[in-house]
Amino acid sequence: MIAVQEKVQFSKEIAKFEIKNEEQAIQTEELLEEVLEAVAEGNEDLRAFMGFLEYELEKYKTTLIEKKATGAEVLIFLMKQHGHVQKDLSYLISRSTISELLNGKREFTTEHMKKLGEFYRVSPAVFMCNSQGN
């Protein structure tokens, strides 16, 4: 069990934590996976930390959206975060359509947004954000 003083120090340090870029988001996602495994193995002391990491990742995703990222930028972010390439999405949407969406040559349809939202477990609305890049 962690001593109270160590917990207080850890809390002070963690309060400064903020995901500021895509690389940090990916690193946080990797750390979260490790923490999830530890919790699954019975390390309950990490459960609160797990929740914190989930919260910070969600906050970063929301911030990305609030910055009026294009649907393509959101999709690129989600693909990188999950280690996906266009081929991984081809059973949802054709590869040529994915390419056009990513390059801004095609608008996201309601069906695209719905399928991608379900696949990435995000609201389909995230792909509507500033779809023209304005």
Image (spheres, helix red, strand yellow):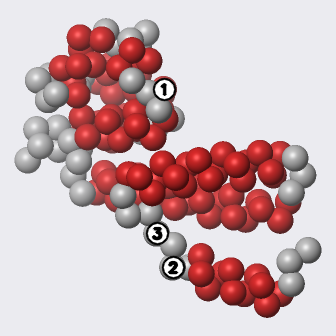
Q: Amino acid at mark 1?
A: Phe
- Are the two marked residues, 2 and 3, in contact with CB atoms closer than 8 angstroms? yes
Disc assigned to residue 119: 1
Q: Amino acid at mark 2?
A: Lys
Q: Is residue 79 above or below residue 16?
A: above
Is residue 80 visible in the rendered image? The answer is yes
Marks 2 and 3 sit apart, C-alpha to C-alpha, by: 7 Å
The picture places residue 34, in percent across and down from the top left corner, at 70, 49
Q: Residue at x 73, y 65 (%)?
A: 48
Sequence-first tag of 2 and 1 = 2
Q: Which residue is mark 2?
A: 16
Is residue 107 visible in the rendered image? The answer is no
Left or right of 81 in this view: 15: right
Q: Residue at x 24, y 57 (%)?
A: 67
Q: Is residue 26 above or below residue 120?
A: below
Left or right of 44 in this view: 59: left
Marks 1 and 3 sit apart, C-alpha to C-alpha, by: 26 Å
Marks 2 and 1 sit apart, C-alpha to C-alpha, by: 32 Å
Left or right of 114 in this view: 129: left
Camera-side residue of 65 and 39: 39
The picture places residue 118, in percent across and down from the top left corner, at 48, 27
Q: Residues within 10 Å of mark 2 (few under 14, many from 20)?
A: few
Q: Residue at x 62, y 64 (%)?
A: 52
Secondary structure at numbered mark 2: loop
- Are the two marked residues, 2 and 1, in contact with CB atoms closer than 8 angstroms? no
Q: Amino acid at mark 3?
A: Glu
Disc assigned to residue 18: 3
The picture places residue 133, in percent across and down from the top left corner, at 12, 43
Sequence-first tag of 1 and 3 = 3
Camera-side residue of 32 and 55: 32
